[in-house]
Image: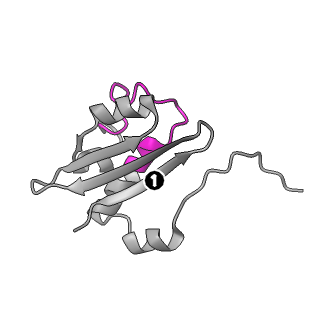
Amino acid sequence: MMPSTVIVNMNTCNKSHKITVSMRDDGDMDVDIKTDCKNVQEYANRLKKITMADMSDRHGSKILDPDVSASLSATCLVQIGVMDAAWIETGMLSGSLCKKVRQNEIILDRYDSE
């Protein structure tokens, strides 16, 4: 099986992150993050391996752990990218659906009903 990869483009800081998660024989997952951001690189250095519990239970998740993610800004989407890649890798998020929709969005503009 091919590892699962997602791209996180943070246009507000002009940084890009390529996150790859691959299943290991023991059921844990390896996390590889290629980035041009020193803060995300610090996070990546602390997050090399995750478990099923890390991706399925927010409480106690290494992905979201404040000590692991201390270098990230509160608005950085890289943690969600790791979650997405892990969910795709485990089949909890459909790879074919992801190919079809291609991306999710956060629109940084106020809602205007006019």
| Foreground residue among 73 and 51 | 73
Residue 92 spot, x, y in % from top left: 33, 64
> Looking at the figure, which quarter contains the N terminus?
bottom left
Residue 28 visible in the picture = yes
Residue extending furthest toward the front: 36
Please check the rendered image and state whether residue 78 is part of the magenta-colored stretch, yes or no.
yes
Please check the rendered image and state whether residue 22 is part of the magenta-colored stretch, yes or no.
no
Considering only vertical position in the picture, is 20 above or below 45?
A: below
Q: Residue at x 24, y 40 (%)?
A: 48
Residue 26 spot, x, y in % from top left: 9, 53
Considering only vertical position in the picture, is 39 above or below 94?
A: above
Q: What range is drawn magenta here?
A: 62-82
Residue 68 spot, x, y in % from top left: 33, 29
Q: Residue at x 85, y 56 (%)?
A: 113
Which residue is the site of mark 1?
7
- Few, some or many residues within 10 Å of mark 1 (<14, 14–19, 20+): some
Residue 24 spot, x, y in % from top left: 15, 55
